[in-house]
Image (spheres, rainbow, N blue to C red):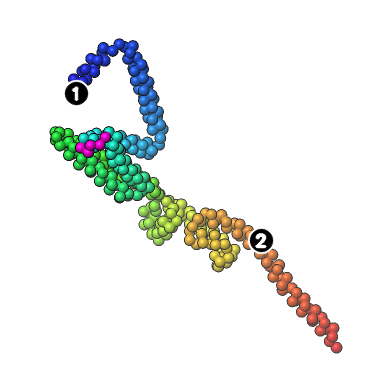
Amino acid sequence: MNDRIVAALEAATTIPWWDLTPALTGVALIALLLIRFIASAVRAIRDLSEEKRDTTIQLLLTIGFLVVVGALVAEGIIGFARDEMGLGPVLSVAVFIGIDGVAGFFAHTAYRWAKVGGRALFPRAMVILIIAGSAWFQWIHAADLALAAQVARAGMPLIAALLLETLLVSRRKTWKQAQTTLGTSVPRARWLWDPIGSAGITRRQQLWAVPDWEDALELHMIRMEAIQRLRREFGPFWAWKVPATVSVRLRKGFRVSEAADMVDDIITEHQEQEPQAKEEALEQIIPPAVSIQKALGTAEGRWP
């Protein structure tokens, strides 16, 4: 190997510089484009929020290590398929692509499930099974090498499996933290001096899914005020006289603010309809009274 490098360097020194100009120009352009791409990627990552930036960096580092392990596995599998299985160059590469493609499919599925809190036991088990098989293959394939090289070849796939598992656990924890609503509970001093009221506030806080205990208490006050107004207007059986969209929400504590906003319209409508109802009732009572007076007048006229 060293002789080849020396020979290549000696051959390069014999080439005129003007013949190397196109190649050097192409290499310089590729390097410039690569530097600009890396700078743009760094700026894009830096502009992300702290949480997204940490997630992106973690994902890039994991993918980078998996690519290195995949290249190591490819060297062994392609050589094994070509030398031991007697396959051609195309099929040898196809064997590696098929095996790593299946592993990548299960890894991607497990990652997507982990992002929404799923454990993805079957995809994870398949990934671990394939990686364990790759580690065993690397151990057998490197049997003629030194022990350190054999351990390194077999250990890198196992490290990749642990790294992938760590990434999945991190994604599940991130999802759970995002789903957990943070808030403030009832202070201890209030529990000490008003345990019954504190228990009621905590109960409403949990039933109504309100994170802050003060917001739960404020919502309870809005609910009680709306119920008192309806009770003064419609009486003790107000729940049967108002629309169900209001009565159910106020009695069950469901969308209390929306129901409280509808109370004014309900009371106004009822107050407008009440005089009309009284007039109709009077109209039903007055005709009998008039007929009675006419009957009495007729009777008085006939009295001898």
Q: Which residue does the image show at 70% across and 68% down from the upper left?
A: 280
Q: Is residue 29 visible?
A: yes
Decide whether residue 177 is among the magenta residues.
no
Q: Is residue 85 magenta?
A: yes
Q: Amino acid at mark 2?
A: Glu
At numbered mark 2, what does the secondary structure look like: helix, strand or loop?
Answer: helix
Does residue 299 appear left or right of residue 143 in this picture? right
Q: Which residue is mark 2?
A: 272
Residue 248 in the image: above or below residue 51: below
Amino acid residing under circle 1: Met
Query: Looking at this view, is 230 or 269 the one in front?
Result: 269
Is the residue 32 above or below the residue 196 in the image?
above
Query: In the image shown, does 182 or 146 lie closer to the viewer?
Result: 146
Q: Residue at x 36, y 53 (%)?
A: 188
* Residue 61, quarter of picture: top left
* Chief secondary structure of the magenta portion: loop
Q: Does residue 185 appear to the left or right of 279 in the view shown? A: left
Q: Position of residue 169 (x, y in %)?
A: 31, 45
- At mark 1, the secondary structure is loop
Residue identifier under label 1: 1
Res 195 quadrant in image: bottom left
- For the residues labelled 2 and 1, the Cα–Cα distance comes to 101 Å
Viewport quadrant of the N terminus? top left
Residue positioned most to the bottom: 304
**Residue at left offset 21%, top offset 20%:** 5
Task: Specify whether 204 is left or right of 274.
Answer: left
Q: In x, y percent, where is residue 93? A: 28, 35
Relative height, residue 204 to residue 97 (above, below): below
**Quadrant position of residue 196:** bottom left
Instruction: From the image, state whether disc 2 or disc 1 is nearer to you.
Output: 1
Q: Considering only vertical position in the picture, is 245 above or below 171? A: below
Task: Please report the bounds of the magenta region as a residue range.
Answer: 84-88
